[in-house]
Amino acid sequence: TKAKTSRAGAKKNGKGSGEEAALPSATPSSSGGGAASSKEATAAEKAAIDRVESVRAQLEQQKAKLEETFAEVERQQQAAAAAAAEVAQKRAEYDEINAKKIEQGKVVDESVGNARIDVANQAKRHAEEEAQRLAVVTDLRERGNIAMRRGDLTAARSFYSEAAEVPLVPDGERAKLLGNRAACYMALKRYDLAAVDAEECTELQPDSGKGFYRLGCARFANGEVGAALKALAEAEELMPESAEVAAKLEEVKAVCPEEVKVQTRWKSAGKGLEELLEPPAG
């Protein structure tokens, strides 16, 4: 029994020894597998590093783009700020110019207003002065008329002459004054002076029938029959209802019938010429 046990133990031991002896031969195989794993790990690590570097590069590119974008935004902001500053400056200049214009306009308006007031005041002064002058002339002329009615010819002439010295008298008023003084001179038998006043009267007031009548009388008294006839004919046209003018005209015509014929011929010739010069009717 012991012997069997020993053999069995020996076999067992022998089998175990064989297994133990076989273990060393398996070591080289394990070493080869470790190297492959190491290479794989290295490759994986490199790939990971490459991915990290790629991501890092992408991040750098994105960062650069962001910085460029920020820079562009800053440039645009600066440009916008500059434009806004320019607009503000122009606006300020415009406001300043507009304020000056408004101020100048106020000055101009004030000046124009003052000028208008001055003109109005000046016109008022002139009107007042003219009214005063007219009042003086009217008063002196009326005094002369009163003196004429009393037969005081010297006083009448003095009043009329004093009134004639007043300056800036309206033409109509001066014409009346000269006509009255011409009548005074006729009464004083100063026919030459009467003709001068009467002629100026007709120049100042061409529609004055009395002026032409007095002029005709003065011319006739001076022996100027032709001039008298012409003036009286004008007076008759202006005052066709006046019997006094008609009588004086007939008196002049009776004195010099030849002159009447000449005047008539010239008048007819003048009318014929006017008819020739007038445009045809229609």
Image (spheres, rainbow, N blue to C red):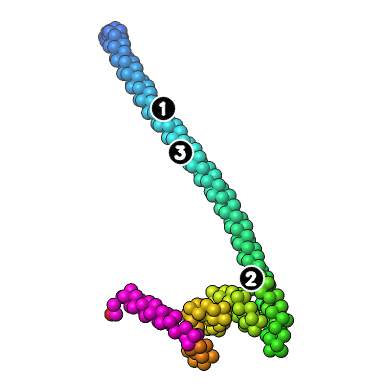
Nearest to the observer: residue 197 or residue 261: 261
13 in relation to 275, above or below: above
Instruction: Kindly identify the amino acid type of the residue bearing the numbered disc 2.
Output: Leu
Asked if residue 88 can be seen in this view, the reply is no
Nearest to the observer: residue 76 or residue 247: 247
The residue that disc 3 covers is 76
Please, what is the dominant secondary structure of the magenta stretch?
helix
Where, quadrant-wise, is the C terminus in this rendering?
bottom left
Q: Secondary structure at mark 3?
A: helix
Looking at the image, tell me whether mark 2 or mark 1 is earlier in sequence order.
Answer: 1
- The answer to whether the residues at label 2 and label 1 have Cβ atoms under 8 Å apart is no
Disc 1 to disc 3, how far (Cα)? 24 Å
Residue 168: numbered disc: 2
Disc 2 to disc 3, how far (Cα)? 79 Å
Q: Residues within 10 Å of mark 1 (few under 14, many from 20)?
A: few
The residue that disc 1 covers is 60
Q: Secondary structure at mark 2?
A: loop
Q: Position of residue 199 (x, y in %)?
A: 56, 75
Q: Tell me, yes or no, whether the highlighted magenta stretch contains residue 268.
A: yes
Disc 2 to disc 1, how far (Cα)? 103 Å
Q: Tell me, yes or no, whether the highlighted magenta stretch contains residue 262.
A: yes
Q: Residues within 10 Å of mark 2 (few under 14, many from 20)?
A: few
Query: Residue drawn 33% across and 15% down?
Result: 38
Instruction: Kindly identify the amino acid type of the residue bearing the numbered disc 3.
Output: Gln
Q: Secondary structure at mark 1?
A: helix
Nearest to the observer: residue 259 or residue 104: 259
Looking at the image, tell me whether mark 2 or mark 3 is earlier in sequence order.
Answer: 3
- The answer to whether the residues at label 2 and label 3 have Cβ atoms under 8 Å apart is no
**Magenta span covers which residues?**
252-281
Q: Nearer the viewer, mark 1 or mark 3?
A: 3
